[in-house]
Image: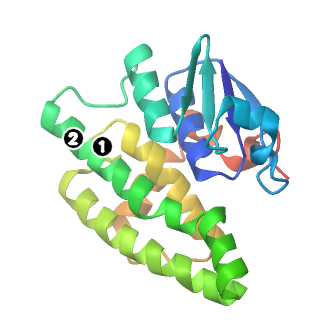
Amino acid sequence: MKLYAYYRSSASYRARIALNLKGLDYVIVPVNLLKAEQKSEAYQALNPQGLVPLLVDGDASVSQSMAILEYLEETYPVPALLPQNRAERAQVRSLALAIACEVAPLCNLGPTTFLAEHFNATEEQKTQWMHHWFKKGFDAVEAMLAKSSGSFCHKSEPGMADCFLVPQVFNAGRFKFDLAAYPNVLRVSENCNKIPAVMEAHPSKQPDAV
Protein backbone atom coordinates (compact mmCIF):
# COMPACT_ATOMS: atom_id res chain seq x y z
CA MET A 1 0.00 0.00 0.00
CA LYS A 2 1.32 3.45 -0.98
CA LEU A 3 0.24 6.88 0.21
CA TYR A 4 1.30 9.74 -2.04
CA ALA A 5 1.44 12.65 0.36
CA TYR A 6 3.00 15.93 1.43
CA TYR A 7 4.04 16.06 5.06
CA ARG A 8 2.26 19.36 5.86
CA SER A 9 -0.89 18.71 3.85
CA SER A 10 -3.83 18.44 6.24
CA ALA A 11 -5.60 16.00 3.91
CA SER A 12 -2.51 13.77 3.85
CA TYR A 13 -2.34 14.04 7.65
CA ARG A 14 -5.94 12.74 7.88
CA ALA A 15 -5.12 9.71 5.78
CA ARG A 16 -2.00 8.92 7.81
CA ILE A 17 -3.96 9.03 11.06
CA ALA A 18 -6.61 6.69 9.66
CA LEU A 19 -4.05 4.22 8.31
CA ASN A 20 -2.22 4.24 11.63
CA LEU A 21 -5.37 3.82 13.71
CA LYS A 22 -6.22 0.77 11.62
CA GLY A 23 -2.70 -0.60 12.04
CA LEU A 24 -2.09 -0.90 8.31
CA ASP A 25 1.34 -1.10 6.70
CA TYR A 26 1.98 1.51 4.03
CA VAL A 27 4.79 3.39 2.34
CA ILE A 28 4.85 7.17 2.06
CA VAL A 29 5.67 8.49 -1.42
CA PRO A 30 6.46 12.19 -0.94
CA VAL A 31 4.96 14.73 -3.33
CA ASN A 32 6.45 18.18 -2.74
CA LEU A 33 3.69 20.74 -3.25
CA LEU A 34 6.04 23.70 -2.94
CA LYS A 35 8.06 22.34 -5.87
CA ALA A 36 4.83 21.70 -7.82
CA GLU A 37 5.54 17.98 -8.09
CA GLN A 38 1.76 17.43 -7.98
CA LYS A 39 1.58 19.12 -11.39
CA SER A 40 4.09 16.78 -13.03
CA GLU A 41 2.94 14.65 -15.93
CA ALA A 42 3.89 11.49 -14.04
CA TYR A 43 1.83 12.36 -10.98
CA GLN A 44 -1.17 13.63 -12.91
CA ALA A 45 -1.24 10.33 -14.76
CA LEU A 46 -1.88 8.77 -11.33
CA ASN A 47 -4.19 11.51 -10.06
CA PRO A 48 -5.65 13.87 -12.68
CA GLN A 49 -6.67 16.33 -9.96
CA GLY A 50 -3.03 16.86 -9.10
CA LEU A 51 -3.76 16.79 -5.38
CA VAL A 52 -2.60 14.84 -2.36
CA PRO A 53 -3.21 12.41 -0.83
CA LEU A 54 -3.56 9.49 -3.19
CA LEU A 55 -3.86 5.97 -1.81
CA VAL A 56 -2.81 3.02 -3.97
CA ASP A 57 -3.82 -0.35 -2.57
CA GLY A 58 -3.27 -3.13 -5.08
CA ASP A 59 -5.54 -2.35 -8.03
CA ALA A 60 -7.41 0.35 -6.11
CA SER A 61 -6.35 3.97 -6.54
CA VAL A 62 -8.28 6.44 -4.36
CA SER A 63 -7.94 10.22 -4.17
CA GLN A 64 -9.66 12.70 -1.82
CA SER A 65 -9.19 12.15 1.90
CA MET A 66 -12.84 11.43 2.73
CA ALA A 67 -13.03 8.81 -0.02
CA ILE A 68 -9.77 7.29 1.26
CA LEU A 69 -11.13 7.02 4.80
CA GLU A 70 -14.39 5.52 3.55
CA TYR A 71 -12.43 3.03 1.44
CA LEU A 72 -10.32 2.04 4.43
CA GLU A 73 -13.42 1.66 6.59
CA GLU A 74 -15.11 -0.61 4.07
CA THR A 75 -12.01 -2.63 3.15
CA TYR A 76 -10.39 -2.90 6.59
CA PRO A 77 -13.36 -2.53 8.98
CA VAL A 78 -11.53 -3.38 12.21
CA PRO A 79 -10.90 -1.26 14.18
CA ALA A 80 -13.81 0.87 13.08
CA LEU A 81 -13.61 4.60 12.43
CA LEU A 82 -17.40 4.93 12.37
CA PRO A 83 -19.96 3.91 15.03
CA GLN A 84 -22.50 1.16 14.37
CA ASN A 85 -25.58 3.34 14.85
CA ARG A 86 -26.74 4.91 11.58
CA ALA A 87 -27.60 8.32 13.06
CA GLU A 88 -24.30 8.45 14.94
CA ARG A 89 -22.38 7.58 11.77
CA ALA A 90 -24.09 10.51 10.06
CA GLN A 91 -23.13 12.81 12.95
CA VAL A 92 -19.49 11.76 12.70
CA ARG A 93 -19.47 12.32 8.94
CA SER A 94 -21.12 15.73 9.42
CA LEU A 95 -18.38 16.80 11.80
CA ALA A 96 -15.64 15.55 9.48
CA LEU A 97 -17.20 17.32 6.49
CA ALA A 98 -17.65 20.56 8.44
CA ILE A 99 -13.85 20.68 8.51
CA ALA A 100 -13.10 19.09 5.14
CA CYS A 101 -15.54 21.22 3.13
CA GLU A 102 -16.01 24.47 5.03
CA VAL A 103 -12.58 25.25 6.49
CA ALA A 104 -9.61 23.37 5.11
CA PRO A 105 -10.08 24.04 1.35
CA LEU A 106 -10.30 27.78 1.92
CA CYS A 107 -7.07 27.90 3.89
CA ASN A 108 -4.77 25.77 1.77
CA LEU A 109 -2.10 26.68 -0.75
CA GLY A 110 -4.39 27.05 -3.78
CA PRO A 111 -6.71 29.83 -2.52
CA THR A 112 -3.99 31.77 -0.68
CA THR A 113 -1.73 31.68 -3.74
CA PHE A 114 -4.65 32.89 -5.89
CA LEU A 115 -5.30 35.76 -3.48
CA ALA A 116 -1.68 36.85 -3.73
CA GLU A 117 -1.36 36.47 -7.51
CA HIS A 118 -4.69 37.98 -8.55
CA PHE A 119 -5.54 40.42 -5.75
CA ASN A 120 -2.06 41.31 -4.50
CA ALA A 121 -2.91 40.07 -1.01
CA THR A 122 -0.13 40.59 1.50
CA GLU A 123 0.95 37.92 3.99
CA GLU A 124 -1.03 39.76 6.67
CA GLN A 125 -4.15 39.79 4.49
CA LYS A 126 -3.78 36.09 3.70
CA THR A 127 -3.54 35.39 7.42
CA GLN A 128 -6.67 37.47 8.04
CA TRP A 129 -8.46 35.43 5.36
CA MET A 130 -7.47 32.15 7.02
CA HIS A 131 -8.36 33.37 10.51
CA HIS A 132 -11.83 34.31 9.27
CA TRP A 133 -12.47 30.77 8.04
CA PHE A 134 -10.80 29.19 11.06
CA LYS A 135 -13.15 31.10 13.35
CA LYS A 136 -16.25 30.32 11.33
CA GLY A 137 -15.34 26.63 11.20
CA PHE A 138 -14.20 26.18 14.79
CA ASP A 139 -17.27 28.03 16.09
CA ALA A 140 -19.43 25.37 14.46
CA VAL A 141 -17.20 22.43 15.38
CA GLU A 142 -17.05 23.53 19.03
CA ALA A 143 -20.84 23.58 19.20
CA MET A 144 -21.08 20.17 17.52
CA LEU A 145 -18.56 18.67 19.94
CA ALA A 146 -20.49 20.10 22.90
CA LYS A 147 -23.40 17.87 21.87
CA SER A 148 -21.69 14.59 21.03
CA SER A 149 -18.09 14.36 22.15
CA GLY A 150 -16.59 12.32 24.96
CA SER A 151 -12.85 11.89 25.21
CA PHE A 152 -12.85 12.06 21.41
CA CYS A 153 -15.08 13.55 18.73
CA HIS A 154 -17.55 10.73 19.25
CA LYS A 155 -17.61 9.21 22.72
CA SER A 156 -14.63 7.23 24.00
CA GLU A 157 -12.82 5.98 20.88
CA PRO A 158 -10.95 7.94 18.19
CA GLY A 159 -12.56 7.76 14.77
CA MET A 160 -13.14 9.45 11.45
CA ALA A 161 -13.94 12.92 12.77
CA ASP A 162 -10.79 12.94 14.89
CA CYS A 163 -8.76 12.23 11.73
CA PHE A 164 -10.05 15.57 10.41
CA LEU A 165 -9.94 17.59 13.63
CA VAL A 166 -6.30 16.97 14.57
CA PRO A 167 -4.80 18.32 11.31
CA GLN A 168 -7.06 21.38 11.41
CA VAL A 169 -5.90 22.19 14.94
CA PHE A 170 -2.30 21.76 13.75
CA ASN A 171 -2.95 24.21 10.89
CA ALA A 172 -4.51 26.72 13.26
CA GLY A 173 -1.34 26.59 15.34
CA ARG A 174 0.86 27.09 12.29
CA PHE A 175 -0.97 30.31 11.47
CA LYS A 176 -1.22 31.50 15.08
CA PHE A 177 -4.98 31.28 15.38
CA ASP A 178 -5.94 31.42 19.07
CA LEU A 179 -7.99 28.36 20.08
CA ALA A 180 -8.54 29.42 23.70
CA ALA A 181 -12.26 29.95 23.04
CA TYR A 182 -12.69 26.32 21.97
CA PRO A 183 -12.28 24.07 25.03
CA ASN A 184 -13.91 21.02 23.45
CA VAL A 185 -11.72 21.29 20.36
CA LEU A 186 -8.60 21.56 22.49
CA ARG A 187 -9.60 18.72 24.83
CA VAL A 188 -10.33 16.29 22.02
CA SER A 189 -7.21 17.26 20.09
CA GLU A 190 -5.02 16.84 23.17
CA ASN A 191 -6.49 13.40 23.84
CA CYS A 192 -5.90 12.36 20.25
CA ASN A 193 -2.30 13.53 20.31
CA LYS A 194 -1.54 11.18 23.20
CA ILE A 195 -2.25 8.15 21.00
CA PRO A 196 0.86 6.63 19.33
CA ALA A 197 -0.96 6.13 16.02
CA VAL A 198 -1.78 9.84 15.90
CA MET A 199 1.65 10.90 17.14
CA GLU A 200 3.32 8.94 14.33
CA ALA A 201 1.15 10.70 11.75
CA HIS A 202 2.40 14.14 12.82
CA PRO A 203 4.01 16.16 10.01
CA SER A 204 7.33 16.31 11.86
CA LYS A 205 7.58 12.51 11.77
CA GLN A 206 7.28 12.20 7.99
CA PRO A 207 10.16 11.30 5.64
CA ASP A 208 9.82 14.57 3.68
CA ALA A 209 9.61 16.83 6.75
CA VAL A 210 11.96 19.80 6.64
Q: Quadrant of the N terminus?
A: top right
Residue corresponding to mark 1: 93
Question: Does residue 180 appear in the picture of this structure?
Answer: no
Q: Is residue 110 left or right of residue 150?
A: right
Q: Is residue 67 above or below residue 73?
A: below
177 or 104: which is nearer to us? Answer: 104
Q: Are marks 2 and 1 in contact (CB under 8 Å)?
A: yes
| Residue 6 x/y as whole percent | 72, 45
Classify residue 99 as left or right of residue 38: left
The colour mode here is rainbow
Q: Residue at x 65, y 34 (%)?
A: 47
Give the structural element (helix, strand or loop) at label 2: helix
147 left or right of 15? left
Q: Secondary structure at mark 1?
A: helix
Return the residue nearer the eye: 121 or 200.
121
Task: Estimate the x, y position of residue 59 in percent, counting from the top left.
Answer: 59, 11
- Identify whether 169 is placed above or below 50: below
Front residue (pair 97, 179)? 97
Spatial separation of the CA atoms under disc 2 and disc 1 = 5 Å
- Which residue ends up furthest to the top in the rendered image? 58
Q: Position of residue 40 (x, y in %)?
A: 81, 42
Residue 201 x %, y %: 63, 39
Q: Residue at x 64, y 63 (%)?
A: 110
Disc number for residue 90: 2
Query: How many badges with numbers are in the image?
Result: 2
- Kind of residue at badge 1: Arg
Viewed as shown, does residue 11 lie left or right of 38? left
Q: Which corner quadrant of the image does residue 185 belong to?
A: bottom left
Residue depicted at 40% across the width and 53% down the height: 188
Q: Mark 1: few, some, or many residues within 10 Å (few <14, many ≥20)?
A: some
Q: Amino acid at mark 2?
A: Ala
